[in-house]
Image (cartoon, rainbow, N blue to C red):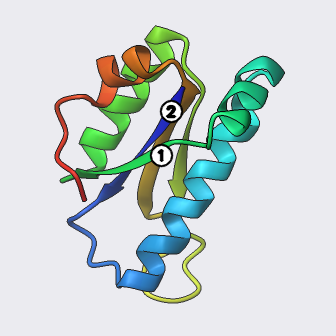
């Protein structure tokens, strides 16, 4: 079991903003997973990986792939209180789910 968090590289997030958006995405997708997946992921160490996306379009394409695969996922939009305009898409989390299924969606992306 693992979770992949995909963060945009084209919106100029600082390190702290990036960390917050990744955390939002991780928690939101976790909440969208079923109880068995949540329990298995938590008991297995909550494996996560953070990857790069170069555009909003790429985030939405990956989200659609996750939807088609039946995977828990969440797209995050910033509230606009600090660095970004309200509604800016910042990140996507896919999983927790079996590693091979998450990799079907995110396996070709580069590490952040």
Residue neighbourhood size for the residue with mark 1, other residues' Cα within 10 Å, grouped as few (<14), some (14–19), many (≥20): some
- Reading the image, the residue beneath label 1 is 48
Residue drawn at 35 percent across, 56 percent down: 7
Residue drawn at 30 percent across, 31 percent down: 106
Residue drawn at 77 percent across, 21 percent down: 34
Relative to 84, residue 35 above or below: above
Discs 2, 1 touching: Cβ within 8 Å:
yes
The percent position of residue 97, horizontal first and vertical second, equals 55, 22
Quarter of the C terminus within the rendering: bottom left
Quadrant of the rendered image containing residue 61: top left
The total of numbered circles placed on residues is 2
The percent position of residue 87, horizontal first and vertical second, equals 51, 63
Q: Residue at the far bottom: name it.
A: 82
Q: Earlier in the sequence, mark 2 or mark 1?
A: 2
Camera-side residue: 56 or 108?
A: 108
Left of 34 or right of it: where is 94? Answer: left
Residue drawn at 75 percent across, 39 percent down: 31
Left of 13 or right of it: where is 97? Answer: right
Residue neighbourhood size for the residue with mark 2, other residues' Cα within 10 Å, grouped as few (<14), some (14–19), many (≥20): many
Relative to 7, residue 34 above or below: above
Q: Residue at the far front: name it.
A: 44
Quarter of the N terminus within the rendering: top right
Left of 40 or right of it: where is 51? Answer: left
For label 1, the SS is strand
- Reading the image, the residue beneath label 2 is 2
For label 2, the SS is strand
Q: CA distance from mark 2 to mark 1?
A: 6 Å
């Amino acid at each position: 079991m693992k979770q992949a968090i995909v963060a945009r590289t084209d919106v100029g997030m600082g390190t702290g903003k990036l960390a917050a958006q990744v955390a939002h995405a991780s928690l939101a997708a976790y909440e969208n997973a079923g109880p068995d997946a949540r329990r298995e992921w938590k008991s297995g160490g909550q494996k996560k990986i953070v990857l790069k996306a170069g555009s909003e379009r790429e985030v939405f394409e990956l989200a659609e792939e996750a939807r088609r695969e039946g995977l828990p996922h969440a797209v995050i939009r910033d509230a606009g209180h600090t660095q970004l305009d309200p509604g800016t898409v910042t990140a996507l989390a896919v999983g927790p789910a079996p590693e091979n299924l998450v990799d079907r969606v995110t396996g070709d992306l580069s590490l952040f």
